[in-house]
Amino acid sequence: MKTDSTNNDVEILIVEDSPTQAEQLKYILEQHGYRYSVARNGKEALASIGRRLPTLVVSDVMMPEMGAYELCHEIKRHERFKKIPVILLTSLTDPTEVVKGLESGADSFIFKPYDEGYLLARIGYILANRHLRESESPQMGVEIFFAGRKFFITSDRLQILNLLLSTYEAAVQKNRELSVTQDKLKQLNDDLESANKELEAFSYSVSHDLRAPLRHIDGFSQLLVKECPDQLPPKAQDLLRKVSERANFMGRLIDDLLNFSRLGRQPVDKRPVILTELVRQVLEELAPEREGREVEVRVGELPDCMGDAILLKQVFVNLLSNAFKFTRKKERAIIEIGSEPDENPAEFLCFIRDNGAGFDMEFAGKLFGVFQRMHRATEFEGTGVGLSIVQRIIHRHGGRIWAEAKIDHGATFYFTLPHNL
Ligand code: ADP
């Protein structure tokens, strides 16, 4: 590469519409003794070249008014300009860019984001080879088909080689970066997995240890009311009953949390499951929820699937309990369970629809979070853990889950499961 003092003979025309990117280029070139001028698009660049020939053009590809490919065409078809090497700056998102670069007669690509060393090496290389170009005899054009289009390439051999080698070099570099990123990602994943395991174990033991003192709070407050009814005024007895009631509720929260964290540790035992039978059992168990109410339950066709029957039963228990609960205020509840084919033929879509209270879709993102509730406890009781358990089970089966709802117009929960193929 040239030394900084000799770089001073070189004038580089920067063609860049982004002021920050132009500043970055200017800074690098200035640091290495290059002279430069700046144009904001192809048109300005052509005008500038007309006034004074630069040694080299470094141009961004995407620009308003006139982009780099057109600029390059113009430079290369002009007798006076055509020996000026053109380097294109691109992020290479589309492989046809390489062919467009060849077609426009560009000399090299620099791929964004570039590092300083790479940019300077490319410039140095193109400048060093510039004189070789002058001895190259012009080539006949060649027609090629690429990505369903015809391109006509008239670049000379050196140009073609330079351009292709710069692309290849960038691809190799990107590949190397990708493999480093992949290694890092794997390490992060392993760390995350072990942090998750630790967290699971922690929440399990905390929940477990909280259970015993809570039982005592409940037990002693009940005992107090029972053993000393005469010493306690009715107000105090009432308050003690509330203490016991809240302790019971906390017990339920802890149980749900324990179930949830147990799920993360328990292996999933996948076997063929007859869903129709599983849903029938769940509906039978939930029969008390329907007592004294008018509820129509429609069960559509359900395919057999592969899964852990115990866990999948929990999914239907939680979703159907919610459907019964959130339709409680409807005079006539309708609950529908059914299935549809999924885009992925190895899976199917299952849904549970109700015509109950629904919820605001604005908060749908929080629906499956632990302790997240869309309704007040005074309206509908609950702990806010049921759906997190459902989501965890579906994810552990490799499926997806989401919901659609409208306030007062019911909710539909969808999830995917693998077929028993
Ligand atoms: P819980 O029902 O114990 O509160 P879940 O985790 O099962 O906990 O549900 C979380 C919240 O999602 C509920 O509090 C409710 O606001 C909303 N939700 C769940 N299922 C339905 C449904 N079928 N209709 C309307 N809202 C629902």
Image (cartoon, grey):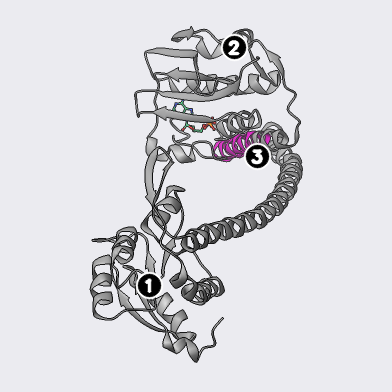
Depicted 364 relative to depicted 294: above or below: below
Q: For mark 2, what is the residue?
A: 279
Q: Quadrant of residue 379?
A: top left
Depicted 132 relative to depicted 339: above or below: below
Residue 243, image x and y in percent?
61, 40
Tell me if label 2 and label 3 are in contact, CB under 8 Å: no
Tell me if label 2 and label 1 are in contact, CB under 8 Å: no
The reply to whether the residue tagged 1 has its Cβ within 8 angstroms of ligand 1 is no
Whether residue 244 is in magenta: the answer is yes
Q: For mark 3, what is the residue?
A: 231
- Report, in whole angstroms, how far the alpha carbon at label 2 lies from the one at label 1: 75 Å
Q: Earlier in the sequence, mark 2 or mark 3?
A: 3
| Element carrying mark 3 | loop
Image quadrant occupied by the N terminus: bottom right
| Secondary structure mostly taken by the magenta-highlighted segment of the chain | helix
Residue drawn at x 71%, y 42% is 207
Q: Which residues are magenta?
A: 233-255
Residue 367, image x and y in percent?
49, 36
Query: Given the image, on which type of amino acid does mark 2 rest?
Result: Val
Depicted 385 relative to depicted 333: above or below: below
Q: Nearer the viewer, residue 354 or 325?
A: 354
